[in-house]
């Protein structure tokens, strides 16, 4: 039986959505508010991070994201699409009669769903509207840096950068890799250390969680409240720590770099293929290399990988093509393990996730290489030569000790990063 089929069978047994669809009350035509409620209940019960409701060729498929991977929950008749979309629009206070334009909204915490909040995005496609619901569970979100799964040396280096009075700390990684959680945890750590003696402010898009003793602002493009405008104003608010949700454009980058040079601790995210690639990205935004060398104190690359289920993990032999990526001297002593699938892990073989990271601390040799505009590959090598352990190496260590699979590491870390 395939993993996908096993998951579907699992939900055949426990799914509130399927139970409702099979009930007599739904035979004559479902009550769509109840159907949507059960879809949300199933997703929350499974600890999903997102719900995808999308019209396919002949069905309206409902998928949930479990540990970063989409899993089919149920297929509904296509004719349900308009009513389900309408119900979500009502929940998020969106325009119900508008179907040709994207819409986004927020649903406050619902006690009936365990207190989770929802961010709803509706996008028009040629087959109809696609609905994606991001689920935020405040009770299931920890902002303790020590609980994020960083290796001890990475955690120590990150905290060491955080206690510096100034500089720019950047986090990089794809969407859903844990950057926001890491930044919130960093701010929470600063609040715990300094209490009311430190002024901390953020500019985000959107604000995902309210942090104690932190002034959080949300950009609003409709009112021209952009990242650059917010940051320029914020600099006159006497902040000591500034968090910028994302560096997207040259103007935001320039202000963030300048703030890091003028006595502020700035923490932000930026999309890049690697930690060393962040510097090339910023140079492409017309930031001078000598400014980068002086302002950036460190770059943390993060990914999330699924843990093997401790209940059903067993020895296995990785694919020979993948096995070639493991150094020959380490293959004989490796404990390759993979989850077979059980009720504890919803028959996926995985339960929970680890953080795999790469901490690049900017030291004097690295600064000189940045000023000399050394290519990204060479920059990466400079960092490695001075003690940086790559993300691939850290991930491989988890594979060799049986914590996850080789295939899982390669799903998250591209071959170019090896």
Image (tube, rainbow, N blue to C red):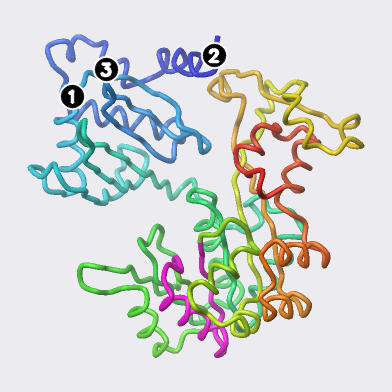
Q: Position of residue 86 (x, y in %)?
A: 15, 37
> Which residue occupies 54% across, 18% down?
3
Q: Position of residue 300 (x, y in %)?
A: 63, 62
The answer to the question of whether label 3 and label 2 lie on touching residues, with beta carbons closer than 8 A, is: no
Magenta-colored span? 245-270
The answer to the question of whether label 2 and label 1 lie on touching residues, with beta carbons closer than 8 A, is: no
Q: Position of residue 217 (x, y in %)?
A: 35, 71
Q: Secondary structure at mark 3?
A: helix
The quadrant holding residue 363 is bottom right
Mark 3 surroundings: few (<14), some (14-19) or many (≥20) residues within 10 A: some
The quadrant holding residue 411 is top right
Rounded to the nearest angstrom, the CA distance separating label 3 from label 2 is 26 Å
Question: Would you name the residue on which mark 1 appears?
Answer: 80
The quadrant holding residue 348 is top right
Compare residues 16 and 294 and report the one nearer the observer. Answer: 294
Q: Is residue 68 above or below residue 194?
A: above
Question: Would you name the residue on which mark 3 appears?
Answer: 20
> Which residue occupies 70% across, 25% down?
338
Return the disc, 3 or 1, that comes first in the chain's sequence.
Answer: 3
Compare residues 20 and 403 and report the one nearer the observer. Answer: 403
Question: Would you name the residue on which mark 2 appears?
Answer: 2
**Can residue 142 be found in the magenta stretch?**
no
Q: Position of residue 249 (x, y in %)?
A: 41, 71
Q: Secondary structure at mark 2?
A: loop
């Amino acid at each position: 039986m395939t993993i996908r089929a096993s998951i579907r069978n699992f939900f055949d047994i426990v799914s509130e959505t399927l139970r409702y669809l099979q009930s007599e009350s739904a035979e004559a035509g479902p009550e769509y508010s109840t159907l949507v409620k059960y879809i949300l209940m199933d997703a929350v019960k499974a600890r999903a991070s997102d719900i995808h409701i999308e019209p396919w060729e002949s069905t309206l498929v409902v998928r949930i994201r479990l540990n970063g991977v989409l899993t089919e929950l149920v297929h509904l008749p296509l004719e349900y699409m308009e009513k389900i979309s309408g119900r979500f629009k009502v929940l998020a206070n969106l325009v119900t009669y508008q179907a040709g334009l994207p819409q986004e909204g927020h649903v406050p915490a619902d006690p009936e769903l365990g207190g989770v909040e929802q961010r709803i995005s509706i996008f028009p496609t040629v087959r109809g509207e696609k609905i994606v619901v991001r689920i935020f569970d405040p009770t299931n979100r920890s902002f303790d840096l020590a609980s994020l799964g960083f290796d001890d040396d990475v955690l120590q280096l990150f905290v060491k950068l955080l206690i510096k009075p100034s500089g720019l700390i950047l986090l990089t990684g794809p969407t859903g890799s844990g950057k926001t959680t890491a930044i919130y945890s960093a701010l929470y750590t600063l609040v715990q250390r300094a209490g009311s003696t430190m002024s901390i402010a953020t500019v985000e898009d959107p604000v995902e969680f309210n942090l104690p003793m932190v002034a959080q602002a949300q950009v609003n493009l409709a009112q021209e409240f952009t990242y650059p405008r917010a940051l320029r104003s914020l600099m006159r608010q006497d902040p000591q720590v500034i968090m910028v949700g994302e560096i997207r454009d040259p103007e935001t980058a320039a202000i963030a770099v300048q703030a890091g040079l003028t006595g502020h601790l700035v923490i932000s995210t930026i999309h890049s293929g690697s930690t060393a690639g962040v510097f090339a990205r910023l140079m492409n935004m017309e930031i001078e290399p000598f400014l980068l060398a002086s302002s950036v104190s460190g770059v943390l690359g993060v990914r999330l990988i699924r843990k093997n289920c401790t209940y059903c993990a067993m020895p296995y032999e990785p694919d020979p093509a993948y096995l070639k990526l493991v150094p020959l001297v380490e293959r004989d002593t490796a404990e390759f393990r993979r989850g077979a699938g059980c009720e504890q892990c919803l028959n996926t073989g995985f339960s929970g996730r680890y953080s795999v990271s790469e901490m690049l601390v900017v030291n004097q040799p690295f600064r000189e290489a940045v000023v000399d505009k050394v290519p990204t590959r060479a920059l990466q090598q400079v960092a490695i030569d001075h003690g940086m352990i790559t993300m691939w190496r850290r991930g491989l260590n988890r594979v060799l000790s049986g914590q996850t699979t080789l295939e899982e590491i390669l799903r998250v870390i591209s071959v170019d990063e090896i």
